Image (cartoon, rainbow, N blue to C red):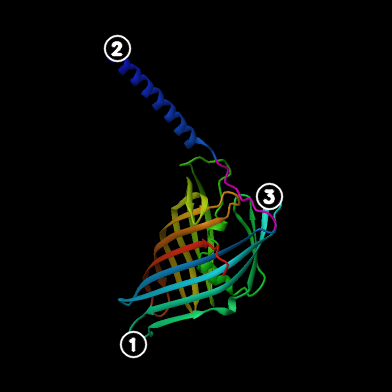
Amino acid sequence: MTSVSSTIRIIVSGLVACVMTHVSQAAVQEKVLLRMRLKKDMSFRYEARTTAAQQMIIMGQDISNDMVSQIRMSMSVIDAPLDRSTIRCVFSDAKFAASARSIEGIVPNVDTSMAMTRFDGTEAMMTIDQIGKLVSMQWIKDSSVATFVRSSQFLTRFSSPFPLQEVGVGDSWTTTTTDTASTGTASGGIITEMTLKSTFRGIRDTLGFRCWLIETSALAYNLSGTISTGGIDMDLDGAGSCSVRSFIEPSTGMVVFSTGDISSNSRMSVSGQQPMIVPVDSHISFSVKRRTENK
């Protein structure tokens, strides 16, 4: 009898294990369609913060620069037909701090911080399609803020598209991006080319929201470009890495919280009266956070 009972327990345990395995596999295999689901008159508020550090070696001496910036943005959905959404962005409360340690006796050290109140009220209109791809961006007021916003990586996640197909936990997709950044008064620019791999990690809770978690890393990250100023040409080439974690609100497809790190190692070839090779190491950390408080 004892032997029969033991056998029954083993069979029952096996059946339970099979059922639990089947249920677990079904949950893992459940597919999700990642999409923007915005409606007219929806509104969102965000705060972005960026820290950047750069180190160069010129004539055997180190030059280091550190920067911290932050800015707030209010977003209002102006129109939302089926295939895309038009959003008005209003920027405010921009702050900037920088420090530089330069070549002693030639270039002075710098420490500065400021509230950039002239950016308050700056507006931009952007259009995003269903998969979150940035279709267009138009600056309505004070386009000088565009460079500051780009450097803060504020809109990085808003222009990173979802996959076309449904995905399950652990599924990945790739996107390629090419971005050209101008360099102020100098001619030319820096081109960043990336191949990004994104992976859907499932559902997570953050900041009081139930969110999709998407992790993204760069399979390829290349820098190139030429900058010309004052009769001097500087050619840049290099490579880097990038990683981002984004928590997305499923009901809208909008970011709740996103954080990322970007590092690069490059060489700047300088021509002119004193040609030289300048190694440049850079690291950028950024975050974009949904604001829920009233102030």
Please state which of the two labelled residues, at mark 1 or mark 2, is closer to the viewer: 2
- Whether 39 is among the magenta residues is yes
Amino acid at dot 1: Gly
Please tell me whether residue 99 is drawn above or below residue 254 in the rendered image.
Answer: below
The residue that appears at 44% across and 27% down in the rendered structure is 19
Residue 233 percent location from the top left of the image: 47, 74
Does the image show residue 251? yes
What kind of element bears circle 1?
loop
Q: Which numbered disc, 1 or 3, marks the residue that appears first in the sequence?
A: 3
Distance between the Cα atoms at labels 1 and 2? 95 Å
Residue located beneath label 3 in the image? 83
Q: Which label sits on residue 44? A: none
**Residue annotated with mark 1:** 105
Determine whether label 1 and label 3 are within 8 Å by CB.
Answer: no
Dot placed on the residue nearer the N-terminal end, 3 or 2: 2
Residue 196 seen = no
Q: Which residue is mark 2?
A: 1
Q: Which residues are magenta?
A: 32-40
Residue neighbourhood size for the residue with mark 2, other residues' Cα within 10 Å, grouped as few (<14), some (14–19), many (≥20): few
- Crowd around label 3: few <14 · some 14–19 · many ≥20 (10 Å): few
Q: Is residue 131 above or below residue 171?
A: below
Tell me where residue 81 appears, x and y as whole percent: 71, 52
Residue 243 highlighted magenta (yes or no): no
**Residue under the point 40% across and 80% down:** 273
Q: Amino acid at mark 3?
A: Asp
